[in-house]
């Protein structure tokens, strides 16, 4: 893999051709099983999901969390926290109209700040910071009620830089670090190098909890019902669990680590996907034009696109699926440990085996995706239902709990940018559909710039409506 300079996705593709769609991959001294077929993965991770519920996370992920949080923990306490997170996020927006209002509120603020930089009717910007801040504020309001105002932006970007540093620096070699080799000097140094940036983000979360508790004690913040946000809801549940004799995950350390997981994962992958989305659209103007025509036919230029329009935007939905498939933002999925002997395809997999459904391989399976490296949204409009095989958020009990939020953000933000602005690539900083060359946890788009210009008729009415619609 490293001598031939193949990507992990390419390597697993080669293994699949040679050894089949269920094969063993030796990662150093540790054997693991890869599943690269959609039907087999669905049967294992969903239909037999209880046997694959335990995530085998690298020691480096578990170390700062102390086996707490939503991402790196397992067992009954993890299940308790996942159910609580899904229930609470649903109450504060997911599955309700309120999430659209929150997304569009931040979208409008972003557009107002962008238009404040216009010169001669337009401006050219690198979109990453703008998108990062918008998505962070959507998540912040669900977790803490607060948002990053102008005076807080510097603090946010410092925190975001720490997250980016950790994601960028982590490599597949770091997955070999474990408790038994932590005392080796070079390993200890490597752990400090990778995890150092995370401590700043943890301190931010701890400060949010401290401030909320102080505000409650001083009477500045009063919790009514389940509260206004995730922190409120968790503190309410902590109070309920005080007299419970059974083991409970409702303590401040669990809250701290759950906030860390939700805050980082809740914005990072969506920002990365949005950057790929605009790269895709700018490099495929014929696709962009068809999307714009469909959006205009739905909105009539009189309103922003809404989540209720999803059933009426088949081509735009197809484009979003193809963006997910082509971006492949998570090239390698972490493994799970089987909790019992179980059949995976034609093989009996023993209890305690590390196994993963490699999503990047499933979404480039030539059985379903002809010309797999060619961008073609029309492939989803044939009635074959291959959109089911586009699974960027994973399978089963360990699938991403924020999928509904992320899908809503992508649907609304991309479409309403297209409705509001004429967007074109900067010829000196063009996007490409190739990831940055760096070892890390994600495929990230290269740096590029977009020129934003206010739309002329027939979109001008939509601009004014979007400005006031969610005030």
Image (spheres, rainbow, N blue to C red):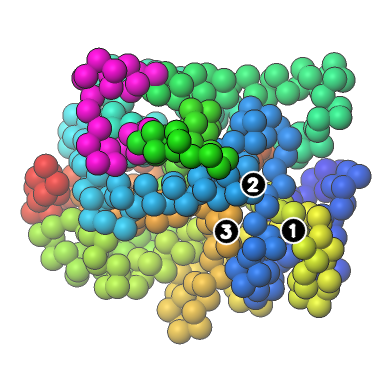
Asked whether residue 272 appears in the rendered view, the answer is: no
Give above or below for 192 relative to 315.
Answer: above
The mark lying in front, picked from 2 and 3, is 2
238 left or right of 419 in image: right
- The structure residue drawn at horizontal position 72% and vertical position 39%, both measured from the top left corner, is 58
N-term-proximal mark, 1 vs 3? 1
Residue ID at (83%, 73%): 347
The total of numbered circles placed on residues is 3
In the image, the segment drawn in magenta is 210-235
Label placed on residue 229: none
- Report if residue 340 lies within the magenta region: no
251 left or right of 32? Answer: left
Position above or below: 331 against 246? below
* Pointer 3 local density, CA inside 10 Å: few below 14, some 14–19, many at least 20: some
Q: Point out which mark residue 74 bears.
A: 2
Mark 1 sits on what residue?
339
Front position among marks 1 and 3: 1
Q: Which residue is mark 3?
A: 397
The one of 157 and 79 positioned closer to us in this rendering = 79
Q: Position of residue 96 (x, y in %)?
A: 26, 56
Give the crowd class for mark 2: few <14, some 14-19, many >=20 residues within 10 Å.
some
Q: Position of residue 67 (x, y in %)?
A: 64, 36
Residue 120 shows in the view: yes
Q: Is residue 17 left or right of residue 247?
A: right
Task: Estimate the spatial distance between the alpha carbons at disc 2 and disc 1, rounded to whole Å.
Answer: 11 Å
Q: Is 329 placed left or right of 275 in the picture?
A: right
Name the image quarter holding residue 437.
Answer: top right
Q: Is residue 219 magenta?
A: yes
In depth, the one of 442 and 276 nearer the eye is 442
Q: Is residue 244 above or below residue 166?
A: below
């Amino acid at each position: 893999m490293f001598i031939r300079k193949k990507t992990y996705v390419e390597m697993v593709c080669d293994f699949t051709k040679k050894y089949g769609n269920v094969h063993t991959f030796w990662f150093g001294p540790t054997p693991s099983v890869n599943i690269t077929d959609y039907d087999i993965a669905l049967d294992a991770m969903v239909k037999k999901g209880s046997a694959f519920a335990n995530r085998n996370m690298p020691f480096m992920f578990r170390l700062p969390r102390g086996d707490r949080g939503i991402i790196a923990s397992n067992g009954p306490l993890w299940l308790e926290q996942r159910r609580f997170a899904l229930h609470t996020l649903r109450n504060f927006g997911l599955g309700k109209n309120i999430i659209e209002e929150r997304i569009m509120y931040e979208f409008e603020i972003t557009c107002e700040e962008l238009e404040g930089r216009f010169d001669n009717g337009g401006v050219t910007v690198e979109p990453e910071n703008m998108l990062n801040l918008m998505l962070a504020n959507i998540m912040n309001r669900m977790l803490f009620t607060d948002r990053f105002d102008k005076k807080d932006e510097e603090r946010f970007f410092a925190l975001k830089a720490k997250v980016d540093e950790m994601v960028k620096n982590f490599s597949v070699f770091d997955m070999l670090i474990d408790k038994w080799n932590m005392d080796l000097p070079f390993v200890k140094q490597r752990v400090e190098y990778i995890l150092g940036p995370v401590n700043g983000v943890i301190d931010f979360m701890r400060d949010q909890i401290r401030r909320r508790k102080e505000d409650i004690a001083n009477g500045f913040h009063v919790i009514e019902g389940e509260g206004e946000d995730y922190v409120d809801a968790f503190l309410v549940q902590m109070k309920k669990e005080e007299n419970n004799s059974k083991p409970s995950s409702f303590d401040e350390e669990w809250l701290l680590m759950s906030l860390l997981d939700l805050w980082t994962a809740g914005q990072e992958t969506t920002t990365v996907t949005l950057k790929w989305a605009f790269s895709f659209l700018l490099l495929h103007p014929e696709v962009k034009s068809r999307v714009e025509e469909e959006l205009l036919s739905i909105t009539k230029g009189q309103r922003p696109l809404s989540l209720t329009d999803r059933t009426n935007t088949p081509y735009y939905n197809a484009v979003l699926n193809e963006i997910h498939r082509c971006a492949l933002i998570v090239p390698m999925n972490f493994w799970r440990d089987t909790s019992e002997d179980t059949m995976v395809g034609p093989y009996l997999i023993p209890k305690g085996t590390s196994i993963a459904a490699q999503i990047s391989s499933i979404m480039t399976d030539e059985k379903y995706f002809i010309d797999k490296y060619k961008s073609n949204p029309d492939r989803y409009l044939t009635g074959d239902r291959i959109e089911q095989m586009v699974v960027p958020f994973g399978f089963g009990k360990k699938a991403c709990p924020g999928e509904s939020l992320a899908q809503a953000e992508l649907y609304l933000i991309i479409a309403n940018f297209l409705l509001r602005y004429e967007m074109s690539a900067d010829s000196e900083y063009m996007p490409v559909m190739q990831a940055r060359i760096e070892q890390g946890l994600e495929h990230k788009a290269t740096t590029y710039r977009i020129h934003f210009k206010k739309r002329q008729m027939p979109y001008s009415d939509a601009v004014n409506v979007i400005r006031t619609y969610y005030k």
